[in-house]
Image (cartoon, rainbow, N blue to C red):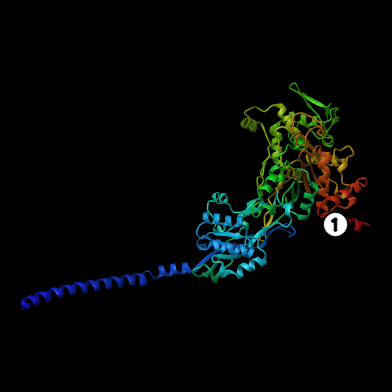
Amino acid sequence: MKRTPTENAASSRKITRRALFLGGSQVAFMGALGLRMRYLQVDQADTFRLLAEENRIRDFLLAPARGLIYDRNGALLAENEQTLRVVIRKEDAAELDAVLIKLQELIGITAEDQARVRDELKKAGPSAPVIIADRLSWEDFSLVSANGPALPGVTPEVGLSRYYPLHSDFAHLVGYVGPVSSYDISRMDTVDPVYKIPKFQLGKFGIEAKLEDTLKGKAGLRRVEQNVHARIIRELDRQEGQPGANVQLTVDHKVQNFVQARLGAESAAAVVIDVQTGDIIAAGSTPAFDPNLFVRGISVPDYNALLENDHRPLPAKSVQGAYPPGSTFKMVTAMAALEAEVTTPDETVRCLGHTEVGGRRFHCWKRAGHGNVNLVGSLRHSCDVYYYEMAQRAGIDQIAAMGRRLGLGQTYDLPLSGINSGLMPDKQWKLANRGADWVVGDSLNASIGQGFVLATPMQLAVMTARIATNREVIPRIVRSIDGVEQPVQGGGDLGLNENMLRAVRQGMFEVSNSNRGTAYASRIADETLRMAGKTGTSQVRSTVVNNNNVPWEERDHALFVAFAPYDAPRYAISVVVEHGGGGSSVAAPIARDLMLFALHGAVPPMESYPSSQRNTIRERFRTLPLIGNDVESDERSQA
């Protein structure tokens, strides 16, 4: 049927509206698309360019070289050794199973290693590296590097690991490092990015721990280009980390070695200190351990063996061990009485073998008594009754004040772990800590270094150095940092009366050089190097029993302190042998050997010893580890 002109016009108008609507919609869509493209390509260009770069370019932290530690003569005590390893990151581990199988074929990683890697990757963050194998041989490392295309996500790395070339000699001073743990991280206020590097080693004990911020350095940065399979195509940039500062100590590695060797299997400690500067020349503690065991994480059996040893190899006894000082404390009591002017060096006290106070009898070590003794004689014979009398006259507060003046009951600012302050008690201390008044019996016990009094070997060495010099000797163990000399502290005059000190020093001299002195058997024959000392034997039980009749752990501690040469003091020394028995028979011979080695800087010549003892001493030195050749060459040179 033929349409009318009116119908044709209406149909044409309808088509035109639809065309316009459709066209407009298309124009609007294209306009919006254009605007979106402009937004993405122009306005957001930098953002998407950055995202693309992040997918293609990866940054890795580089571990800095840890600062080295030297002795006073430049011998290395802690160094860094190269270690080869391969790592993988969680975000790059899409083909983990195939990679581990391939590595098993190439370098023989075990099933246990594979399980460990899977477990660590589950716990690790996306970009946190996990070590697949460490301490690889160069051949294995080369195999992994050559097969890189077949190992997506695996990165071969050359790192550094701590190494202690002198092994156990400096375990208690230098300490050791170990892998950073979650516990270590939890103790940090702010976490340095360097600690996120896999198996990064952090100072755990000793100087390594106390000077961690000085030694650790700052992380570097490595920028590489990767493909979609996480394979490294090329290195774009590399900024090496800033190495840690090098630290030089005051200790002498030869003296330290001799100290450790001479103390041997004893549970013991010894300190050698320069009386002029306070420099610690040696601070030994035995038994010791090899700090290299801790560097990559010590095994459970090895750690349990250290924990279960009744001689306690882990603590640094030279600064952590606190012991009743026994008769080595008698110089403090004597000087307190002299300064309080309640006696004079020439006054005598009659020793009948005991003193009665408040119905209780306090015995002298010599039950028959020493008769009439003055100050010098009381030190020579180590008469207890003399000091019981001085304690009653001077009082504990005067004695405690003198003890602190001589360095007891103090914590020195040394970068060592767990420094013990010891205990120099007085009336106020007992009331505050024991809830009881001080009684006369407490003073008598304290006067001979028993009761509540405790001192570390370091404090006893400082006490002896101050008696030798009348100066405020303060121990120092860090000599320089990156070549910058560290200041010597203290050194001021103690203000003690020189006549009083002269009498005390004379008494100490006779201990070692009078044929009636308690340490005469350990005298030095060379008159230019003669030693002034004091023996000590401190009880660890309340009853007096012969040491030979009780178990080792119930025997007395043996102590000895000394300085030498007597006429021009250079070194002060303290020796403590736990449960060693008598100070004169056990600690004094050790101290003489250590003093002579420090004075000579080498194995002492036999002329320094009484002729009757030389064969015995020569044989003793031959059995000491690491110095036998020195003894033999010394003998040849003297022949």
Residue 347: horizontal and vertical position, in percent? 82, 31
Q: Is residue 247 visible?
A: no
Left or right side of 85 for 236: left
**Is 138 on the left or on the right of 326, as rendered?**
left
Please state, as top left, top right, bottom left or bottom right, where the N terminus lies in the image.
bottom left
Query: Looking at the image, which residue sits at the far front?
Result: 1
Residue 8, placed above or below residue 48: below
Q: Quadrant of residue 442?
A: top right
Determine which residue is flagged by label 1: 629
**How far from the left and from the top, in percent, is residue 412?**
67, 46
Q: How many marks?
A: 1
Nearer to us in this view, 427 or 616: 616
Q: Secondary structure at mark 1?
A: helix
Q: Is residue 373 above or below residue 129?
A: above
Residue at image coords 90%, 51% = 607
Would you call the spot at circle 1 few (<14 residues within 10 Å), some (14-19), or many (20 or more)? Answer: few
Q: Could you say which is closer to the camera, residue 206 or residue 225?
A: 225
Image point (27%, 73%), residue name: 30
